[in-house]
Amino acid sequence: MKYVRLVGINLLVLSGLLLILAIIMYFMEVNRIQTFFAFTSKKQSEYFIPDATTMFLHKPNIHIYDNWGTPQQKISTERRTNNLGFRDDDDATEKKPNEMRVLVTGDSHTDGVLRYNTQSFVNIWEEKLNKADSTTYYNCMNGGVGYYTFRNYHGFLKKFAYLEPDVFLINVFTGNDFRETVKFEDDRTSVSNIYKSWKMRFRRKFQSAEQQAFPYIQGIEQMLYFESFPSEKERAMKIAEKYLLQIIELCKEQNIRLIVTLLPSRLEVKPEFQKHIQTLFDLDTETMNTNTELTETLIDFLKKQQIEYHNLTPTLQNRTEKLYWDEDLHINPKAHAYIGNFLYDTIVFD
């Protein structure tokens, strides 16, 4: 009897300790998430500011130099923003009578890991349009912001609709926009989300050194997340569709032409790279097809809503040169040039 009582007391104490540990872990993760969205860290605060409508924006009128990369690919970037925080050298001014204004948004791939703003596909597209047409002034505004996803795209249009854009182009990065869609909702500190966040962090902790060296969030983290939580695919898509429907309505109200481009990760562009990552992370074919599956589901929705879209995968496939930086797997200037040329050749303005 004493033995049973002793075991019971030990189990009770152990349960209490585990409960305390769980509570501590919960609040640690809540603090980590809330700190991120407060944009108070040194790295964030030099470039981002919180915003009630978009969640966050670039700081306006900044000029920051960065030097980074690998020994094989040393990169210098000049992060310059204009008076609105857009990645343009020129300030936004009152719309001209002959101006065709194109407002572009997207995540860090659109924001651009580039030496100069003029190397972005947005500015390349603008330059080609203006060279070809002397009667219309084409003003393509690069409002890409790192971390952005569908919620931010909606907020961005709401905030800057006063600029009277004729076209609103969303460059969706299919390598992580679906994962970040669920991460950026208001319930992000719920017990369920905190559990998912901790599970993914523990999974990351037990990866090999080679796996941890891989730029995690540019394609592979989304695959691993939906492998661990397959039911989240449907939730992510519903949230994405919710914000897209609101964008569609706002564009109708403002008489704005809506265009969606779908930017793939390097995993979907280079088959040999995909095979390497599949072997490295020991993933099945279904998991490796996650990003493509989600892209196709989104395309079905865009077709149903009769939204103009362009899948950029064929534009970037089968190229002999590198189109993504080795260091962080963002698209490089060559990819931006291909995309800018594609938009010029494909999208026709009346």
Image (tube, rainbow, N blue to C red):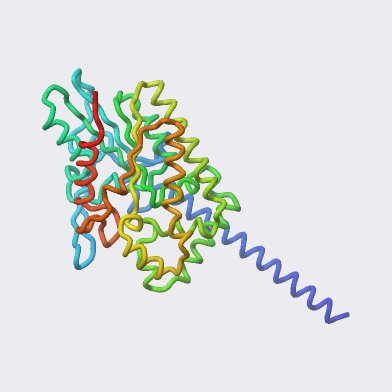
Q: In which quarter of the image is residue 66?
A: bottom left
At a point 20% along the width and 52% down the height, the residue shown is 77
At a point 35% along the width and 40% down the height, the residue shown is 57
Q: Position of residue 223 (x, y in %)?
A: 45, 57
In this image, 42 relative to 226: left or right?
left
Q: Can residue 46 be seen in this view?
A: no
Q: Where is residue 47 in the image (x, y as percent from the top left)?
A: 30, 46
Q: Locate the C terminus by quadrant.
A: top left
Q: Where is residue 245 in the image (x, y as percent from the top left)?
A: 47, 31
In this image, 268 relative to 293: left or right?
left
Q: Quadrant of residue 21?
A: bottom right
Q: Is residue 223 above or below residue 81?
A: below
Q: Where is residue 320 in the image (x, y as percent from the top left)?
A: 20, 58
Q: Is residue 271 above or below residue 233?
A: below
At a point 57% along the width and 51% down the height, the residue shown is 231
Number of marks in the rendered image? 0
Q: Quadrant of residue 138?
A: top left
Q: Is residue 207 above or below residue 220?
A: below
Q: Is residue 68 visible?
A: yes
Q: Locate the N terminus by quadrant.
A: bottom right
In this image, 98 relative to 102: left or right?
left
**Residue reaching furthest right?**
1
At a point 37% along the width and 72% down the height, the residue shown is 210
Quick one: 99 or 147, which is closer to the camera?
99
Quick one: 10 or 156, which is closer to the camera?
156
Quick one: 165 or 276, which is closer to the camera?
276
